[in-house]
């Protein structure tokens, strides 16, 4: 039998499956997969940071705060996504994931801008080329011709990506529906705002376009939003302003590591310790329960975190209420303590910040620039340049004391009163301050009361009751007087004082004199409040905490009942110093009665007001170790209580009743009527005591009675 060689060769030929051919042909006509950038990254992004970095599939659990910014890139409700953040926070990966998602499932031409040619070339070499090599599907779509894969240009099967320096000519001569600007604040602004120039180039694409701008906040002139006039913070200012909130691992209450949050979690460390100890001792402080939180908890806290934008609020239980304000810009602000990629964790952040501050305090060369670099690039916060050290002179303040003002009387123009109590080993020191329109104020009382604050509940009760019942006559001779609106007292100091302070507040609460007067600026405004200074320069102005909270889960109803005002003493002393430097009557001027002067110099009260100076690193310290500073502390605490009740934003045209003019003021009473009402109340209470005395032996009160008599004589006017 003869075998045909042609037939033999045909049997070796393999033919494609016609079903596969048809299926692939049909697939080409299918629309691209509908998947946003975050979901794409979770499915397809591979990280190959060999040599110590992470290697493996992208995992949202590492930095959950990156999910929402990535999702906003495919939103049709925004035209721009602005991401503020420090180095090593993952913000650059947002643009990289967007590029991968665009190439594989949602093609559209893309422009990527960096500050300089050198920076963009380094970025392509170190980040983009290795990323393409690590993703087979992306590599398959990359053009094979040399011009399709250059340093500045990548041509893929259905789109291109161009990498350019953000120069004026590059910004005005290119167009694409998608634009990425890395490190916006480092780009040249000499010929215009890089963002404004770039956004023009995509406007023909309308809501099919998107600009991603990310950067450290280098160009912000300070932490106040009014100073966010350039760079990425100007975009964030005009955005829906998302802020990250995460739960405390101890009480599960939600607070924010962002200084603009409703409740701010701060980074705390021993400011005077050696730098190595600063690094090791750094802890996050929960504003709701006062717990110090170790670095190891941050990953779990991030995993349960949430973004909260403008128009929304978040409860301590994590419930988000309100509707997000509609803006063309989706804004997200990442801070350094959020990032899991910071080498050394929060300890290194504290170390670098403290080191930079000490360099400024020591007057080292370029120390202010170093402090700015740490604040902006490592902490991700706008930088407030150190203020000039204020100079107050005790003699000049004493010379300003006004003979026409009488201690114990409320002068014309005063609208409400705050009182502060400083705790010393053997006494209470009390300052009472009246406030008027635009922050003008008058010192109306100052005294020292002998007591035993560490061990005597009776002394605490007598002191607080004296202030609760105090009536300060108005100077109009109408027989009327004004009551104190808010009392703040120091809750720290020697052993035993904190416990006594908390117990005294509980008893005032039972008397119904410690009462909640509403919610002002997101804080409960208590009429009586224990206070505690937070020594961190970056601490928020004022947080209301409940340090005895026992909550362990988000649904528990129990909470600590004693509120504590945790305030920034450095910032409030800045304010007090500024106010005392205003010599002309009017906004923020402080008026001192002549009765505060001693018979002859020196004048101890005024010496205490200048006993501290502000150093260039923002901290207030004593000018000498033995200087007395109680008067300055009292001025600060009266400021805190006025701030708690909304003084800086008080609507003086239509104020609340307790800050109204005298004829309509709810804290103004006729002295005779008030005294008669109190006597009647005391009589009823006395009858109850007599009725109980038959079965209850009277305790020994000799020493306490003596103290009460001393207190009564000191408070009498």
Image: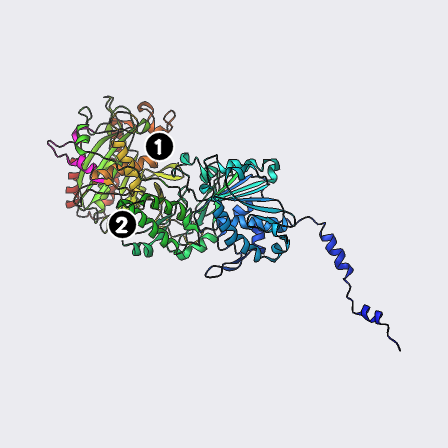
Residue 358: x and y, percent?
A: 28, 48
State whether residue 690 appears in this view. no
> For residue 665: magenta?
no
Q: Residue at x 44, y 53 (%)?
A: 301
Label whose residue precedes the other's in the sequence (2 or 1): 2
Q: Quarter holding the C terminus?
A: top left
Task: Note whether 276 is above or below 358 in the view shown.
Answer: below
Q: Residue at x 20, y 34 (%)?
A: 446
Q: Nearer the viewer, residue 571 or 335?
A: 335
Q: Quarter holding the N terminus?
A: bottom right
Label at residue 648:
1
Q: Nearer the viewer, residue 12 or 230?
A: 12
Q: How is the image coloured?
A: rainbow
The kind of secondary structure element at disc 2 is helix
Label 1 crowd bin: few (<14), some (14–19), many (20+), radius 10 Å: few
> For residue 593: magenta?
yes
- Taking the view exactly as shown, the residue that stands out farthest to the left is 600
Label at residue 499:
2
Task: Note whether 96 is above or below 208 in the view shown.
Answer: below
Label 2 crowd bin: few (<14), some (14–19), many (20+), radius 10 Å: some
Q: Which residues are magenta?
A: 592-612
């Amino acid at each position: 039998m003869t075998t045909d060689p042609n037939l033999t060769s045909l049997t070796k030929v393999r033919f494609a499956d016609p079903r596969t051919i048809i299926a692939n042909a049909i697939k080409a006509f299918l629309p691209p997969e509908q998947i946003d950038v975050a979901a794409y990254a979770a499915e397809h992004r591979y990280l190959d940071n060999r040599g110590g970095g992470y290697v493996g599939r992208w995992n949202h659990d590492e930095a959950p705060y990156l999910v929402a910014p990535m999702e906003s890139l495919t939103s049709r409700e925004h035209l721009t996504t602005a991401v503020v953040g420090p180095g090593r926070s993952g913000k650059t990966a947002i643009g990289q994931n967007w590029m991968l998602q665009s190439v594989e499932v949602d093609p559209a031409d893309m422009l990527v801008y960096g500050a300089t040619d050198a920076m963009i070339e380094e970025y392509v070499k170190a980040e983009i080329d290795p990323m393409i090599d690590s993703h087979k599907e992306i590599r398959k779509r990359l053009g094979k011709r040399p011009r399709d894969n250059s340093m500045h240009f990548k041509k893929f099967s259905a789109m291109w990506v161009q990498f350019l320096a953000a120069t004026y000519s590059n910004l005005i001569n290119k167009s694409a529906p998608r634009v990425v600007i890395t490190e916006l604040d480092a780009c040249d602004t000499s010929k215009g705002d890089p963002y404004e120039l770039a956004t023009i180039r995509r406007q023909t694409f309308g809501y099919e376009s998107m600009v991603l701008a990310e950067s450290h906040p280098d160009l912000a002139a300070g932490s106040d939003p009014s100073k966010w006039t350039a760079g990425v913070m100007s975009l964030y200012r005009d955005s829906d302003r998302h802020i990250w909130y995460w739960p405390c691992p101890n009480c599960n209450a939600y607070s924010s590591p962002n200084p603009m949050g409703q409740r701010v979690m701060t980074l705390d460390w021993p400011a005077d310790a050696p730098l190595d100890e600063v690094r090791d001792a750094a802890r996050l402080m929960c504003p709701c329960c006062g717990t110090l939180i170790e670095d190891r908890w941050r990953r779990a806290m991030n995993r349960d975190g949430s973004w909260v934008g403008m128009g929304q609020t978040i409860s301590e239980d994590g419930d988000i209420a309100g509707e997000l304000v509609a803006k063309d810009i989706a804004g997200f602000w990442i801070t350094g303590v959020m990032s899991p990629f910071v080498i050394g964790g929060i300890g290194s952040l504290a170390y670098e910040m403290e080191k930079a501050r000490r360099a400024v305090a020591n007057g080292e060369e370029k120390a202010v620039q170093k402090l700015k670099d740490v604040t902006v690039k490592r902490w991700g916060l706008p930088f407030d340049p150190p203020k000039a050290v204020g100079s107050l002179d005790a003699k000049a303040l004493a010379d300003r004391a006004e003979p026409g003002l009488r201690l114990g009387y409320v002068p014309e123009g005063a609208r409400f009163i705050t009182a502060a109590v400083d705790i010393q080993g053997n006494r209470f020191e009390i300052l009472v301050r009246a406030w008027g329109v635009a922050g003008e104020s008058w010192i109306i009382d100052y005294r020292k009361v002998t007591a035993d604050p560490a061990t005597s509940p009776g002394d605490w009760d007598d002191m607080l009751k004296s202030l609760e019942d105090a009536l300060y006559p108005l100077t109009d001779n109408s027989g009327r007087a004004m009551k104190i609106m808010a009392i703040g007292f120091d809750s720290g100091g020697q052993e035993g004082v904190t416990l006594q302070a908390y117990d005294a507040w509980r008893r005032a609460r039972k008397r119904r004199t410690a009462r909640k007067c509403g919610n002002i600026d997101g804080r409960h405004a208590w009429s009586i409040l224990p206070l505690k200074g937070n020594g961190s320069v970056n601490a928020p102005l004022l947080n209301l905490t409940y340090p005895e909270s026992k909550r362990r889960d988000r649904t528990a109803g129990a909470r600590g009942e004693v509120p504590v005002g945790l305030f920034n003493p450095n910032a409030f002393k800045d304010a007090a110093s500024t106010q005392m430097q205003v010599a002309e009557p009017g906004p923020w001027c402080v008026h001192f009665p002549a009765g505060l002067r001693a018979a002859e110099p020196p004048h101890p009260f005024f010496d205490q007001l200048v006993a501290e100076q502000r150093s260039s690193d923002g901290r207030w310290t004593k000018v000498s170790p033995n200087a007395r500073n109680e008067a300055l502390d009292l001025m600060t605490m009266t400021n805190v209580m006025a701030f708690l009740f909304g003084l800086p934003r008080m609507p003086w045209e239509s104020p609340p009743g307790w800050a109204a003019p005298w004829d309509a003021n709810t804290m103004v009473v006729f002295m005779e009527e008030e005294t008669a009402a109190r006597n009647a109340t005391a009589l009823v209470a006395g009858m109850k005591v007599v009725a109980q005395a038959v079965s209850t032996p009277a305790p020994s009160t000799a020493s306490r009675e003596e103290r009460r008599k001393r207190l009564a004589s000191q408070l009498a006017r």
